[in-house]
């Protein structure tokens, strides 16, 4: 047991919940930044049975004073900046708020760490969206970036701010360039969960069709529970660094849908409707990560296949719809 203290922004999100569970299991005191909302955002922590084990500290990524206070209250040895407006589609409707939360917000966390405890180890939730219009067939830490959404642009700022604080101030700052990762705790707006929720509703007779946009897009999908392990491994290294975290396999949205429908003995073509409403102004056609550095330096490998992942998600949604 470590006896260490961790501060997680975005603690109410998918990754925040799994990372909290992982760190609690390792004996950390886990503090989570809680942005004030009018609705209940603690359902994921509740589903994992850890709602009472995480110390929630009020704060917002756009309020530097609240981040400084969170650093002081938590006395964090490790800081994981997972908070974000993370839905790519929304980033065209709200580009400025996305830039403020995902770009400037990350800079605010870096500043709070630098001011209160520059020795704390920092993790930034970077993303394969930064590769966008891909410049190499398999994307690694050395592949040039070409973001295709306001979300990707904002995240690129945060990525370079992380690199810059490492180089400017000698901070232990890591950027985890994570490819798509999903789970039963995934937000309903993302395509995997939209599909598994629809499959469960269709199976239960509560829905008759599934409307999607570009089903030819390809993604490198993994399980969030596996990916938070890589985040932790980064903060345990001698020095901070940049790491691609991916499975090394890419699959079309169409095939992912087939897997989900087949899991309950249905055929996707009987229910799927293509709806231009879900197309994006600029698409990331294909993502395929090269996790070789994470494999060799961190000793990290993904443990969950796409079939296992989608099966787990469909089963969870069937239980929710029963
Ligand atoms: P998520 O489920 O959308 O969670 C985002 C979290 O950020 C939520 O806890 C949300 O709080 C919080 N948040 C939003 N605005 C905030 C603000 N102004 N101040 C403080 N907190 C704020 O995202 P996720 O899937 O867990 O992803 C975690 C991180 O990894 C994100 O930064 C995402 O961009 C990045 N990422 C995700 C993937 C992926 O495939 N999942 C891949 C690469 C990178 P509320 O619950 O109150 O809204
Ligand atoms: O879309 C296509 C869509 O919204 C995946 C975030 O976690 O991963 C995520 O971003 C693909 C895209 O994820 C629908 O056009 C088709 O090509 O599940 P998504 P994303 O945009 O890849 C990255 C790594 C992040 O960092 C982000 O935070 O699926 N697609 N039809 C659709 N997508 C959605 N959401 N809904 C549809 O109806």
Image (cartoon, rainbow, N blue to C red):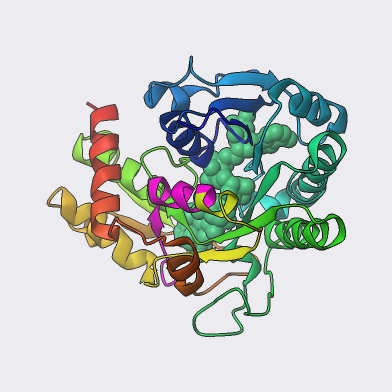
Image quadrant of ligand 1?
Answer: top right
Q: Residue furthest left?
A: 265
- In this picture, is 27 found above or below 198? above
Residue shown at the point (59%, 49%) measured from the top left: 235
58 in relation to 155, above or below: above
Give the image quarter of residue 174: bottom right
Residue 311 to residue 50: above or below: below
Seen in the image, is 198 located left or right of residue 245? Answer: left
In the rendered image, the quadrant that contains the C terminus is: top left
Left or right placement of residue 241 versus residue 268 in this view: right
x then y, percent, for residue 158 = 75, 55
The residue sitting at 48% across, 53% down in the picture is 230
Q: Is residue 156 left or right of residue 215?
A: right
Determine the residue positioned at 66% across, 58% down: 240
Q: Position of residue 292 (x, y in %)?
A: 46, 74
The magenta stretch is 215-232
Q: Quadrant of residue 153?
A: bottom right
Q: Is residue 188 left or right of residue 127?
A: left
Q: Nearer the viewer, residue 240 or 164?
A: 240
Counting every numbered tag in the picture gives 0
Residue 241 visible in the displayed image: yes
Q: Is residue 321 visible?
A: no
Quadrant housing residue 317: top left
- The residue lying at 43 percent from left, 57 percent from top is 212
The x, y position of residue 245, in whole percent, is 49, 62
Q: Is residue 178 magenta?
A: no
Q: Nearer the viewer, residue 248 or 119?
A: 119
Q: Quadrant of the N terminus?
A: top left
Q: Position of residue 126 (x, y in %)?
A: 63, 57
């Amino acid at each position: 047991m470590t006896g260490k203290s961790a501060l997680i922004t975005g603690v109410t999100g998918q990754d925040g919940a799994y990372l909290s569970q992982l760190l609690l299991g390792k004996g950390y005191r886990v503090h989570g930044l809680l942005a004030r909302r009018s609705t209940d955002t603690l359902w994921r922590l509740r589903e994992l049975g850890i709602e009472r084990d995480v110390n929630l500290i009020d704060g917002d990524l756009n309020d530097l004073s609240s981040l400084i206070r969170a650093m002081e209250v938590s006395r964090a040895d490790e800081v994981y900046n997972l908070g974000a407006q993370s839905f790519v589609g929304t980033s065209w409707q709200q580009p400025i708020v996305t830039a403020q939360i995902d770009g400037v917000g990350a800079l605010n966390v870096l500043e709070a760490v630098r001011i209160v405890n520059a020795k704390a180890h920092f993790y930034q939730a970077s993303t394969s969206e930064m590769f966008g219009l891909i410049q190499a067939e398999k994307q690694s830490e050395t592949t040039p970036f070409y973001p295709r959404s306001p979300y990707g642009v904002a995240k690129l700022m945060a990525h370079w701010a992380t690199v810059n604080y490492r180089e400017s101030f000698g901070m232990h700052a890591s950027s985890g360039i994570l490819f798509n990762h999903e789970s039963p705790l995934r937000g309903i707006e993302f395509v995997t969960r939209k599909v598994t929720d629809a499959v469960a509703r269709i199976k239960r007779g509560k829905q008759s069709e599934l409307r999607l946009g570009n089903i030819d897009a390809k993604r490198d999908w993994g399980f969030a529970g596996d990916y938070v392990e890589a985040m932790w491994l980064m903060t345990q290294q001698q020095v901070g660094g940049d790491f691609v975290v991916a499975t090394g396999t890419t699959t079309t949205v169409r095939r992912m849908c087939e897997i989900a429908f087949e899991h309950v003995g249905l055929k996707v073509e009987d229910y799927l409707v293509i709806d231009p409403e879900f197309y994006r102004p600029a698409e990331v056609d294909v993502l395929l990560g090269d996790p070789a550095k994470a494999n060799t330096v961190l000793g990290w490998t993904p443990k969950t296949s796409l079939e296992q992942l989608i099966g787990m998600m469909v089963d969870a949604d069937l239980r929710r719809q029963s």
